[in-house]
Image (cartoon, rainbow, N blue to C red):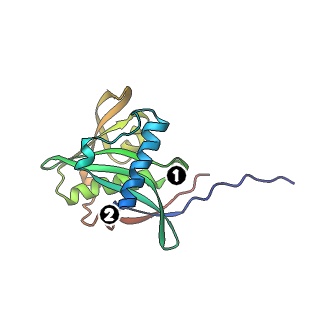
Amino acid sequence: MIIEPVRPFLACEFRVKSATEAWERNRAWALRREVFCQEQGLFGDDDRDSIDDVAIALVALSSLAITHEDVVGTVRIHQQQPGLWWGSRLAVARPYRKVGAIGTSLIRLAVGSARGFGCQRFLAHVQSGNAPLFHALRWRTLEEVMLHGRPHHFMQADLAHYPALTTPETGFLSHLKQAA
């Protein structure tokens, strides 16, 4: 008898929205620490900086039935000056990285929410390995740079591709695409 390995359970539905509860913000920070500090070693024990004082945290919440289980993805957005918005610290929990939709949904929510707040230009520094995803989502590379000792793309979103979202606290539901 051949026993197939059991894949870990992944919730198939999730909501992407702005973090409105303390536990959502705390889990978003914990996920960022896992990804940027522990896994990638980009920062010491904490990746938080002064931008967190003004940023809007966005989260992807895994859903089980009608309750939200955990934060499985996050990104932050902030307005640097009127009309100029930035996205940063996009992180997705390791088990959810190869299934598709979470990073894409967070990017859609980030740019769409900023547009709802009057964004005229949306920028981000993106790790080079993630640049192809952003190119597929209609971003363009303005320049290649080194940040935190790693190659990044300084990128700009094509705002025409992202409808304005006026209710980021509600966000939207999305479904995972299971990898083969």
**Residue placed under numbered mark 2 in the picture:** 20
Q: Earlier in the sequence, mark 1 or mark 2?
A: 2
**Residue placed under numbered mark 1 in the picture:** 96
Instruction: Say whether residue 164 is left or right of residue 34.
Output: left
Horizontal and vertical percent position of residue 65: 52, 72
Q: CA distance from mark 1 to mark 2?
A: 22 Å
* Mark sitting on residue 126: none
Horizontal and vertical percent position of residue 26: 39, 54
State if disc 2 and disc 1 touch (CB < 8 Å). Answer: no
Vertical relation: 131 (above or below) 67: above
Instruction: Name the amino acid type tagged 1.
Output: Tyr
Vertical relation: 174 (above or below) 131: below
- Camera sees residue 84: yes
Instruction: Name the amino acid type tagged 2.
Output: Thr
Instruction: Say whether residue 57 is left or right of residue 3.
Output: left
Q: Secondary structure at mark 1?
A: helix
Q: Residues within 10 Å of mark 2 (few under 14, many from 20)?
A: some
Along the viewing direction, whichever of 112 and 34 lies nearer the viewer: 34
Q: Secondary structure at mark 2?
A: loop
| Identity of the residue furthest to the bottom in this view | 66
Q: Residue at x 31, y 27 (%)?
A: 145
Instruction: Say whether residue 105 is left or right of residue 96.
Output: left
Instruction: Say whether residue 145 is left or right of residue 83.
Output: right
Q: Residue at x 51, y 59 (%)?
A: 176
Q: Residue at x 40, y 33 (%)?
A: 44
Horizontal and vertical percent position of residue 140: 30, 39
- Camera sees residue 104: no
- Quarter of the figure with residue 161: bottom left
Query: Which-is-in-front pick, marks 1 and 2?
Result: 2
Q: Residue at x 22, y 56 (%)?
A: 115
- Quarter of the figure with residue 166: bottom left
Along the viewing direction, whichever of 23 and 87 lies nearer the viewer: 23
